């Protein structure tokens, strides 16, 4: 389906949006691209982001977008190495918790936490990353009754293939055969203070139409990165990027842990290698926030935020949006 789309921050390169409604206003938490001069490679070294801005609006399609400025930088974080990739923010008891992936000084991705009294920041980082955290792309679901769940993980440069059962592999990165189950995202309930995992992270299993886990060779459907979770009509919608096939897809389950059954494509490929998104409801409408590399002339490490409306059919399936219209 062709949809009206809007570039939200045309004057700068922002990507990987996380979006939430706080205090009746829509807040956007993107990563911040810049031209670092690092050559492009499969490890994502060219995505050398180093700070975050926060944006807000009361009308994502047509209203003013407020830039609340710089809210966190790598220089603020005691354990920082490099590459401050995408983040997410959750609110509890009037505090706002920003979860961010960042390579430590050993070049290993961990997930950190920074705290603010306001949704627009600034955010003050904790002195250490979350215990037992690894990989990238944290996304947090507030499921009510003080139940918060973090979804995370990403392949290739996201380092997820270096772990099994939440332990680093002594032999380094390994990938399953094409006919074996694909490497899954992870989910863990957060502790009451929002600063740690309350449990060992679990696999986010995505099943095909026959009830079997998607295989590693099913590149058009299997998880690669960019977890997001939202609820619609009591169901849990786990959405994600397929990475090297450049789609946003989704699967539906009955609880935060799944399993989730594959449903289809949310967004077909856009200009640029990566695709990453957030889905949220605001003032009675649903929106898909994502990015592409059209304004930068196709330079995939310089991406621009976009938004469009998202719709469901009568059966609760998301109507596919064309990425290149």
Image (cartoon, rainbow, N blue to C red):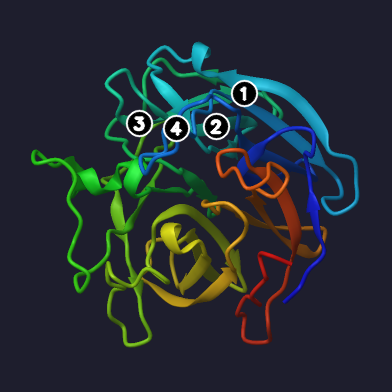
Tell whether label 3 touches label 2 (CB within 8 Å).
no
Q: Nearer the viewer, residue 261 or 17?
A: 17
* Quadrant of the rendering where the N terminus is positioned: bottom right
The Cα–Cα distance between marks 4 and 2, rounded to whole angstroms, is: 29 Å
Tell whether label 3 touches label 4 (CB within 8 Å).
no
Pinpoint residue 302: horizontal percent, then vertical percent.
Answer: 61, 38
Q: Nearer the viewer, residue 234 or 132?
A: 132
**Element at badge 4?**
loop
In this view, the mark in front (1 or 4): 4
Location of mark 1 (residue): 116
From this viewpoint, which residue is outermost toward the right?
63
* 289 to the left or right of 144: right
Label 2: few (<14), some (14–19) or many (≥20) C-alpha neighbours in 10 Å: many
Location of mark 3 (residue): 110
> Which numbered circle lies on residue 98?
2
> Which numbered circle lies on residue 39?
4
The Cα–Cα distance between marks 1 and 3, rounded to whole angstroms, is: 20 Å
Which residue sits at x=19%, y=45%?
173
In this view, the mark in front (1 or 3): 3
Label 3: few (<14), some (14–19) or many (≥20) C-alpha neighbours in 10 Å: many
- Label located before the other in sequence (4 or 2): 4
Pinpoint residue 43: horizontal percent, then vertical percent.
Answer: 36, 39
């Amino acid at each position: 389906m062709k949809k009206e789309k809007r570039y939200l921050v045309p004057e700068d390169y922002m990507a990987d949006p996380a979006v939430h409604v706080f205090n009746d206003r829509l807040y956007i938490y993107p990563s911040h691209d810049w031209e670092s001069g690092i050559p492009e490679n499969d490890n994502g070294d060219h995505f050398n982001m180093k700070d975050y801005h926060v944006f807000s609006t009361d009308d994502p399609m047509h209203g003013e977008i407020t830039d609340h400025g710089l809210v966190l930088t790598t220089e603020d974080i005691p354990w920082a190495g490099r590459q401050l990739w995408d983040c997410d923010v959750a609110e509890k008891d009037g505090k706002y918790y920003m979860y961010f992936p960042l390579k430590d000084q050993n070049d290993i991705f961990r997930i950190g936490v920074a705290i603010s009294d306001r949704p627009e920041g600034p955010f003050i980082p904790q002195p250490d990353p979350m215990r037992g955290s690894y990989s990238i792309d944290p996304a947090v679901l507030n499921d009510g009754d003080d139940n918060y769940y973090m979804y995370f993980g990403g392949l290739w440069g996201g380092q997820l293939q270096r772990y099994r059962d939440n332990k680093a592999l002594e032999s380094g990165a390994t990938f399953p055969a094409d006919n074996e189950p694909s490497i899954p995202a992870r989910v863990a309930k957060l502790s009451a203070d929002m600063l740690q995992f309350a449990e060992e992270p679990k696999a986010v299993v995505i099943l095909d139409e026959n009830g079997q886990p998607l295989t590693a060779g099913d590149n058009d459907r299997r998880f690669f990165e960019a977890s997001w979770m939202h609820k619609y009509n009591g169901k849990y919608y786990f959405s994600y990027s397929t990475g090297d096939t450049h789609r946003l897809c989704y699967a539906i389950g009955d609880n935060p842990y799944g399993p989730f059954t594959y449903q289809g494509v949310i967004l077909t490929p856009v200009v640029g290698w990566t695709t990453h998104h957030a889905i949220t409801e605001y003032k009675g409408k649903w929106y898909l926030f994502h990015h592409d590399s059209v304004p930068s002339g196709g330079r995939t490490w310089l991406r621009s935020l976009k938004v469009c409306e998202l719709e469901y059919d009568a059966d609760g399936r998301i109507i596919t949006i064309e990425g290149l219209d």
